[in-house]
Amino acid sequence: DQQVKQNSPSLSVQEGRISILNCDYTNSMFDYFLWYKKYPAEGPTFLISISSIKDKNEDGRFTVFLNKSAKHLSLHIVPSQPGDSAVYFCAASAGNNRKLIWGLGTSLAVNP
Amino acid sequence: DARVTQTPRDKVTEMGQEVTMRCQPILGHNTVFWYRQTMMQGLELLAYFRNRAPLDDSGMPKDRFSAEMPDATLATLKIQPSEPRDSAVYFCASAPSRGALETQYFGPGTRLLVL
């Protein structure tokens, strides 16, 4: 039973446009959410995070939005660049042990 | 440029053989994680250590998997005996003592194929 769901396995976007990656979760105890990016043959790298006390966090071209009532978060990349082509993982944590629960990832292709 | 290193990068072995994967966390990081990535399950946490002590290994099959940290610069994950269903990419990650525990630095992974 996936507690963190990324329902779109892949997404294709034109360079310069906005990329929107979505993530849904089922556990209302999650209080911290993160996005990681992964290139082939490399480990995931941390991209951006958001605490449940916020509804938006921005870092350069990357913005994460959190809708707690809908148990939904999204990552916006504006403008998208070919170097953004990677697999993006959504992850969440809760409780004292702070274990990360991961989605299955969305493969983003940004076309020149 | 501090990074997590993992060896070997690729491993092909036969069913029943012992497999040992090694990880060197970033110097000064006191928390180390072992993950397994498969197509069907995504990233699963197998075990993690803080200050070399195991905190949680509930994700690890106990009968064949073991994880240790002999010292602060080395973490190991062993599978004995290995089975074809263990084929996956195994990632090690480390995190500093300060900041969010969830901000983890991953190694490049060990790609394991058990025939």
Image: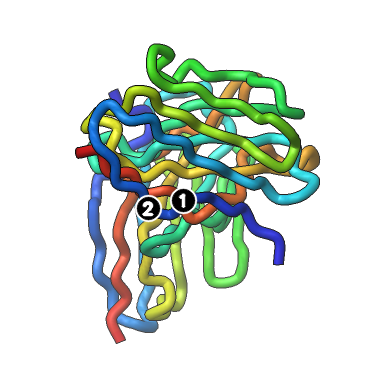
Mark number displayed over residue A67: none
- Give the position of the C terminus of chain B as an image quadrant: top left
Mark number displayed over residue B10: 2
**Could you tell me which secondary element the residue under label 1 belongs to?**
loop
The residue carrying pointer 2 sits among few (fewer than 14), some (14 to 19) or many (20 or more) residues within 10 Å by Cα, namely: few
Q: Is residue A49 left or right of residue B78?
A: right
Chain for disc number 2: B
- Give the position of the N terminus of chain B as an image quadrant: bottom right
**Could you tell me which secondary element the residue under label 2 belongs to?**
strand
Q: Would you say the residues marked 1 and 2 are in contact, meaning their CB atoms lie under 8 Å apart? A: yes
Q: Quadrant of residue B88?
A: top left
- Is any part of residue B21 visible from this angle? yes
Estimate the x, y position of residue B22 in percent, counting from the top left: 55, 42
The residue carrying pointer 1 sits among few (fewer than 14), some (14 to 19) or many (20 or more) residues within 10 Å by Cα, namely: some
Chain for disc number 1: B
Q: Is residue B63 above or below residue A47?
A: above
Mark number displayed over residue B8: 1
CA separation in Å, label 1 and label 2: 5 Å
Viewer-closest of A49 and A83: A83
Q: Is residue A39 above or below residue B110?
A: below
Estimate the x, y position of residue B38 in percent, counting from the top left: 29, 40
Amino acid, disc 2: Asp
Viewer-closest of B24 and B99: B24
Q: Quadrant of residue A6?
A: top left
Viewer-closest of A82 and A75: A82
Amino acid, disc 1: Pro
Q: Is residue A91 left or right of residue B70?
A: left
Which residue is located at x 39 percent, y 12 percent? B63
- Is any part of residue B99 visible from this angle? no
Q: Is residue A45 left or right of residue B30?
A: left
Which residue is located at x 46 percent, y 73 percent? A78
